[in-house]
Amino acid sequence: MDKKSDHTLNSIHGADQTDEQARLVTAVENAAEAIIITDLAGNIQYVNPAFESIAGYSRMEIANRHISILDSGKQNQSFFNDMWRTLKQGDIWKGRFINKKKDESLYETEATISPVKNKAGDITNFVSVQRDVTHEVQLQRQLRQAQKMEAIGTLAGGIAHDFNNLLMGIQGNISLSISEIDSDSPLLENLKKVEQYVLDGVELTKQLLGFARGGKYEVRLTDVNHLLKEQSLLFSRANKHISFEMNYAPNLWSVEADRGQLEQVILNLYMNGLQAMPQEGTLTVQTVNLTIDKEQFKPYRVKAGRYIKITITDTGVGMDEETQRRIFDPFFTTREKGRGTGLGLASVYGIVKNHEGFIDVDSRQGRGTRFEVYFPATQKVAARQNKLADKLSRGIETVLLVDDEEMIIDVGTRMLTKLGYEVITAKNGAEAIESYEAYPDKIDFVLLDMVMPKVGGGEAFDRLREINPAVKVILCSGYSIDGQATDILNRGCNAFIQKPFNLKTLSQNIRAVLDE
């Protein structure tokens, strides 16, 4: 400690006993909290080492500077007026500050400021003891965000499930109508337009499912570099005023993920960059491998281990701090009314979280935005997936169609019959088990809904496997609750189809399962 600081402490304390002075000095110097002593005008007379560590100023730099040097501008004048009024009355003030460090970064403190009086009872100084709570605030913010997304996600999942069932009824009837109508019919164009509107509805439910609890489906080994290259090529062709810069890790680790939802993450982040660069700009995409420990990203409560990081940076208009705090909130959008749903980045957040990853954003107005997305990596090697042939595939086998929605039973029966299959129906899991027990040699495969009352798809699948371990089952649903779809697939289910699906998708998936 320098002599000036020692003198300041001693003079404020007003003690005559050297041992007591020494104990005071030692306690203050070794305190974990930042301690600041000012005069009546607010000029800094002393700071302890904890303050130096937190704020980044040395004692020499901060000495005799006014306390306002720490002001971040986040508190208004009335805040300070109230504080000084309390202190000058001789009372203790408690509250929180958002302070500014030497490097201009912000930190939040929980402070107690006490007036120091001499023997005559006059206030001579103020002592502020401040605890850095920045990390705690980050944790609380993360927890509130997680709780909010959990609640909204539960609601979103239910809405998406019911909405997808409704779209399934519409899509199925459109597919049947298109397959039966003459190619030169004037109604064909109208039907195709309606089908496109259904696809638009599907995209909306995908966004809802993005932040729904457990809302991911088929988890497969995925080569993220390959996925980014595909999406970047498509996006750059459609947006020629944007320049792309790519920097992919040559041996990027694979991830186990829902490919469709990863595409949604990439597209939404690209779209965010595009909207920030309406005239021209550069979108930089980078991937790296990294191994992290819990302390590196403690506020995100992540598991230690191997991760891949996708960094997407734009040179756009950037965001202010308030916008950054809200960008992952469902239905929040900065676009004009009617130009956006506010679900894009909310679904990104949900998808990343559902894949046990995390996301960080850094942006300043006029300086662009950088998103960093982290996904847990695996040592398994991803294989390329072949696309299904672009044609209707028919059959003559017998299918057990299981769904609790009368509308789905109706349209599903007609779609399967159109493809040449014989159809047996069941309206719930219990009926499905009874039907399969009655016709074990006749039924060639089961088209099984996942979300049903009483006996759900998961339990029904397990019971069917007990009857016939080689039973072929295609799972279908408008929503996956708590990752059940993935669990059922891991237990041996042959395939998954997300509602709504058209005649072609249904036919191809059936043949892929029956002919494997």
Image: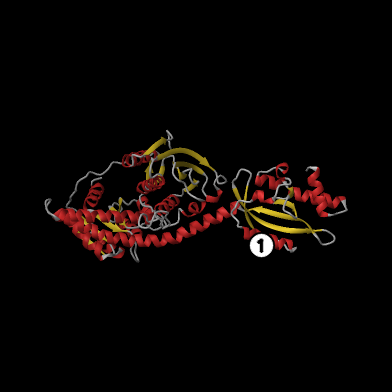
Residue at the spot of label 1: 82
Instruction: Please tell me which residue lies in front, 249 or 282.
Output: 282
Q: Is residue 193 left or right of residue 306?
A: left
Q: Residue 432, located in which quarter of the rendered image? A: bottom left
Quarter of the picture holding the N terminus = top right
Residue 236 placement (x, y as % from top left):
34, 40
Q: Is residue 421 visible?
A: no
> In the image as oriented, which residue stretches furthest toward the top?
250
Residue 357 placement (x, y as % from top left):
46, 48
Residue 516 placement (x, y as % from top left):
25, 45
Residue depicted at 35% across the width and 48% down the height: 260
Q: What number of labels is visible?
A: 1
Q: Is residue 167 visible?
A: yes
Q: Is residue 414 left or right of residue 326?
A: left
Residue depicted at 42% across the width and 38% down the height: 284
Q: Residue 270, located in which quarter of the rendered image? A: top left
Q: Secondary structure at mark 1?
A: helix
Look at label 1 and name its amino acid.
Asp
Residue 401 placement (x, y as % from top left):
24, 59
Instruction: Please tell me which residue lies in front, 447 or 53.
Output: 53
Q: Is residue 68 left or right of residue 237?
A: right
